[in-house]
Amino acid sequence: RFPNGVMVHRVDAYQLSTRLFLRGLGRELRRLRPDWIIVHGVLSLIAPQVLWFAVTTGFEGRITMDDHRSAGNRRRSFSARLACWLFRQVVTPLLRRKCHDYVAVTPETVGILNADLGIPSDEIRQISLGADHRRFRPDSVTRRLMRERLGFDQSSIIIVYAGRIEPAKRVRELVTAVKLLRQRHADVGLLIIGGGSKGYCELVRDELDSETASRGWSV
């Protein structure tokens, strides 16, 4: 339990391709008997787990599904299109019976959920991602100190990636793109913040050879 009263219950997580499966999630939900369940990612493996719990227990609470899908992470391969078609035929009817609250972070996400998964646009709320302006604000002193600490020049343009370091986020591709950019603009730097599987993190580091990693990069 955190000081603010929030309780955390941890279950084992298994990664299947780019998706996470939570072992024992249904058991924990049955034990906790929540009033409100929030699921991140309509196409996640967690969504069917929550739906199965809701169907088998007669759950009458609120289920909210939020989604961050965009054209950039929308897969268009045959297998991806087949998965969306199967989801639309099998899961979407059940989803709409149990979930009446969908949250999309952009208007583009609303369109994708409607086109790919068959969720009516009028059932989707669009709420943009926000930030605490009291915490994230320009601060010249902190800016100078952090650049000194991380080894960046004060005049450099820094690109920041903050998030999970995993194949689905295409962090290696970001490193490659910035390396190409630095061939024309040497004052561009890259800061990577986050964690992930040891193997993929090592692959990202391998993209930073000794020459480019010596200046303008921080992981």
Image (cartoon, rainbow, N blue to C red):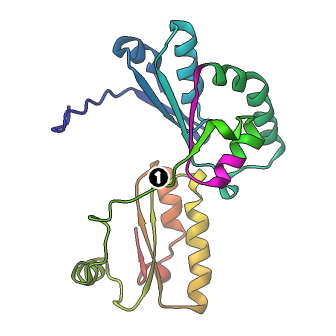
Of 16 and 24, the residue lying toward us: 24
Q: Residue at x 32, y 65 (%)?
A: 133
Q: Is residue 104 magenta?
A: yes
Q: Amino acid at mark 1?
A: Arg
Image quadrant where residue 87 sits: top right
- Taking the image as shown, residue 28 lies to the left or right of residue 16, namely left
Of 200 and 128, the residue lying toward us: 128
| Residue 162 versus residue 105 in the image, above or below | below
Mark yes or no: residue 32 visible: yes
Residue found farthest to the left = 3
Q: Position of residue 60 (x, y in %)?
A: 49, 14
- Taking the image as shown, residue 135 lies to the left or right of residue 203, namely left
Q: Residue at x 48, y 58 (%)?
A: 202
Q: Position of residue 108 (x, y in %)?
A: 67, 54
Q: Which residues are magenta?
A: 98-111
Of 103 and 151, the residue lying toward us: 103
| Residue 35 versus residue 173 in the image, above or below | above
Q: Position of residue 188 (x, y in %)?
A: 49, 85
- Looking at the rendered structure, the secondary structure element under dot 1 is loop
Count of marks, rendered view = 1
Q: Residue at x 50, y 7 (%)?
A: 57
| Residue 209 versus residue 24 in the image, above or below | below
Q: Is residue 43 magenta?
A: no
Image quadrant where residue 28 sits: top left
Q: Residue at x 60, y 51 (%)?
A: 168
Residue located beneath label 1 in the image:
164
